Image (spheres, grey):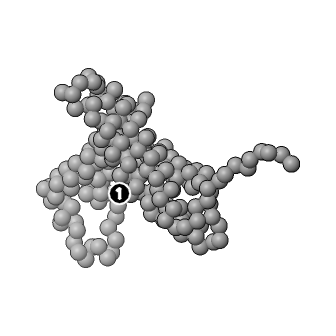
Amino acid sequence: MTDVDEPQIQFLDNFREIFIFITLWTVTTVAVAYFLAGIRAALVFGCKCSLESPTWAYPILFCIFGAGAGFVHGAPMACVFAALYRSIPYEPGVDIATALGIGQGVLIVYFHLGGGVFIHYRECPEPEEDEVRNMYRDLADNRKLPISNAMTSLDPQSYYNSPTSKLEMEKSTMDRWNLKKRKRRFFRTARIKLFG
């Protein structure tokens, strides 16, 4: 017989252990990723590495935010995983729980950094400002979108034809569109500056 020791694998045999282990690894993964993003943000915004400069706190604040976000988004799924493993007669090892926690943390970081948000923008680009203005002007003038018989009883023509309503409608639409455009530009610029 050989004297080789078999590796000792610790098995997690109750709901609490599985939940805590998966949640801990998820929170750690997200916190580390956000800590690195905080370091990158401090470098981009010009960290002077002095106590007078507020940028030295970016990594710490990002890490705390990442840990909180990791817990908020990771704990419910860790609860589901733990309940699933307890409902079947299976005790996962520490290695399986570690892999689940890290994988879940990577998915959370991916979606937090906008990987899942901008997927559909490649397929249908935003219309230009002039196109939106013309579209709503045509809608207001009732040239391209005819009013159905059901709507004619409400007499919307009087509202659309008044000059103040056209101006208000165009202004509110353009304000909303410009706000969305500015937000999208800000987040795209921040993502490029932070992550290259």
How busy is the neighbourhood of tag 1: few (under 14 within 10 Å), some, or many (20 plus)? Answer: few
Residue at left offset 50%, top offset 46%: 106
Query: 102 above or below 80?
Result: above
Residue 32 occupies quadrant: top left
Image: 79 above or below 47: below
**Nearer to the camera, 41 or 122:** 41
Depth check, front residue: 115 or 31: 31
The three-letter amino acid code for the residue at tag 1 is Lys
Q: Residue at x 21, y 28 (%)?
A: 51
Q: How many numbered marks does the figure carry? A: 1
Question: Where does the image place residue 20, in percent across and percent down from the top left?
Answer: 47, 59
For the question of whether residue 72 can be seen, the reply is yes
Q: Quadrant of residue 63?
A: top left
Q: Residue furthest left?
A: 164
Q: Quadrant of residue 159?
A: bottom left
| Rendered view: 2 above or below 195 | below
Percent across and percent down for residue 25 are 49, 50
Q: Residue at x 27, y 24 (%)?
A: 49
Q: Is residue 183 left or right of residue 94?
A: left
Q: Nearer the viewer, residue 90 or 180?
A: 90
Element at badge 1? loop
User: In x, y percent, where is residue 107?
Assistant: 50, 49
Q: Which residue is mark 1?
A: 144
- Is residue 191 something that shows in the picture? no
- Picture quarter with the C terminus: top left
Seen at 39% across and 41% down, the residue is: 34
Furthest residue toward top = 48
Left or right position of 113 against 161: right
In percent of width and height, residue 62 lies at 33, 41
